[in-house]
Image (tube, rainbow, N blue to C red):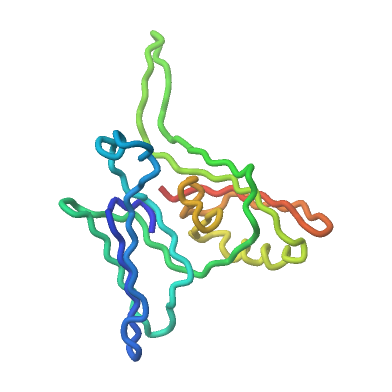
Amino acid sequence: MFGMDAATLRVTITDPIDGVIHDVTHALIETVSVHDAWSYCFGEISSSPDLILRDLPIWSGATLAIQISAPGGTASVGEILIGQDHPIGRTLVDTTIGLQDYSIKERDDFGGAVVVERGFTRTVDFRFVFPTEDARRIQSIMSRIRASVAVFYAGVGTDRFATSVPGFYRDFAVPLSTHYSFGSLEVESLL
């Protein structure tokens, strides 16, 4: 789930034979900016906008229900993507996050600034390492999703680093080496 504005997210999976097989509620309130009593009492309350759930017990015939809520307000979600998880390697520390801004920023004839605000996309330039013997499998995965929307993320628990992106990749390159190879993957978000 991406682009959420909610306090809680509840995921329920029901099997027609076994009944409810998964029912978990996730708290989305961010606590990163709370570092003392003042920030706890007077700081801005924000929610985690993105959440990747892995290893959900989904199989044929099961029903997936997603409920988001925001007490006293309106909850919203930007995107929900469901699919299989295909790890391609271990993310390295020189992974880079950024923004691609589509706003117009110009100067008029008198030197005044003219800014027309437009949309932007988030970008992540992943650096990763993998056993070289996995090269064919990884290239096969990347060729299958080359013109598709996918979720790219650095690993479990890395949401706070802004490396979780629903979107598509612009470039994928791997200079092969003997035992382990180091690759790069440039990703651009949908929104």
Q: Quadrant of the N terminus?
A: bottom left
Q: Is residue 46 left or right of residue 174?
A: left
Residue at image location 35% in from the left, 31% down from the top: 117
Quarter location, residue 10: bottom left
**Point 64% across, 48% down: residue:** 92
**Residue 35: percent from the left, percent from the top?**
38, 38
Determine the residue located farthest toward the bottom in the rendered image. Answer: 17
Q: Where is residue 77 shown, x and y percent of the image?
A: 31, 55
Looking at this view, name the residue that lies furthest to the right: 178
Count the marks: how many?
Answer: 0
The answer to which quarter of the image holds residue 34 is top left
Q: Residue furthest top?
A: 110
Whether residue 61 sits left or right of residue 153 in the image: it is: left
Q: Taking 37 as reference, is 168 above or below it? A: below
From the viewer's perspective, is residue 188 above or below residue 60?
above
Q: Is residue 121 left or right of residue 86?
A: left
Q: Residue at x 37, y 24 (%)?
A: 115
